[in-house]
Image (cartoon, helix red, strand yellow):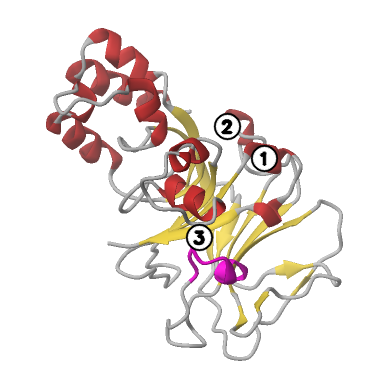
Amino acid sequence: MTQSTVNALHTLAREHLPDDIAERWIGLLRPGLCLEKATGTDPAVGRLGGLPELPEVEEWPVWKGHGPLSFIASLDCAALPSAALDIALPPDGTLAFFYFDGQLDEGCAVVAPHEPDSWAGARVLYIPAGVPVTERAAPEGIQPYPEVPLTARVETTAPYLWHPVVYREFAPMADDHPVWDEDFQEALWDHSGGTEHRVGGHAHPVQDEVEAEVARGALGSPPWTDPRIKEEALRWVLLAQFDTDDDADMMWGDCGALYWLIRPEDLAERRFDRAMFTWQCG
């Protein structure tokens, strides 16, 4: 991870929080990979848009009753500096992300974690290294997104202040607790610079914690007051998030982002079919 990112977050915490609380909050930081447009000699680790390369036996993902999904991005696991992460990404092979983006129905059907019938509208495919692949033409009605090569930068990520891991560390929450002080919130907001394309680390939500949205869906959508949601949310980690991107002509609602999360045990077993999806916009 870049030393500047580490130092900036450590300094920010120590400037705004009491010493003991600052060190506990720093302990919640996690390494992630910021994905940015590759230019010049930047090493490419994946791409947004374009056309996917799939094995012959792999059908283009379809949401039954709605139609084919759009290809969003692919990541070359061997090229990602994943040794810096605290999640067990595959050492090689390719991850391909697909999403039903509304091209076929003008956005009428919505993919959401609280609607199990919609889960087929977002998919992650893992293609092991050495499997022969061919570029696939997009299905009728699907306009591919412009291709944008991506490079990766290791960074340190901070948890959203209302993430269950923050509650667990600092509960019970008091209204005047320094972690939720307005000055600290604003300092974190100024540091973050907004949502981004990211692999691993803490998710950067556009609205509220995406882990809780996925956890509630995994539990069968109980009332939001159900205490199991916060416990279940602790079991999910960010696999990847893809932001609105002008170069790729991607706009998720009102400048939103797409999120795929997974349980660490499913990631270790390469069960990407168990990854869950949510999205947020402003």
Please provide the residue range marked out in magenta: 111-121
Whether residue 17 is visible to the viewer of this picture, yes or no, is yes
Residue 120 lies left or right of residue 13; in this view the side is right
Q: Which residue is mark 1?
A: 89
Residue 85 lies left or right of residue 24; in this view the side is right
SS type, badge 2 = loop
For the residue pair 84 and 164, the one nearer the viewer reads as: 164
Q: Residues within 10 Å of mark 1 (few under 14, many from 20)?
A: many
Whether residue 39 is visible to the viewer of this picture, yes or no, is no
Q: Which residue is mark 2?
A: 85
Q: Residues within 10 Å of mark 2 (few under 14, many from 20)?
A: some
Check if residue 267 falls in the magenta segment: no
Residue located at (32% from left, 23% from top): 171
Measured from the top left, where is residue 101 in percent x and y?
49, 75
Three-letter amino acid code of the residue under disc 2: Leu
Measured from the top left, where is residue 153 in percent x and y?
49, 39
Residue 113's mark? 3
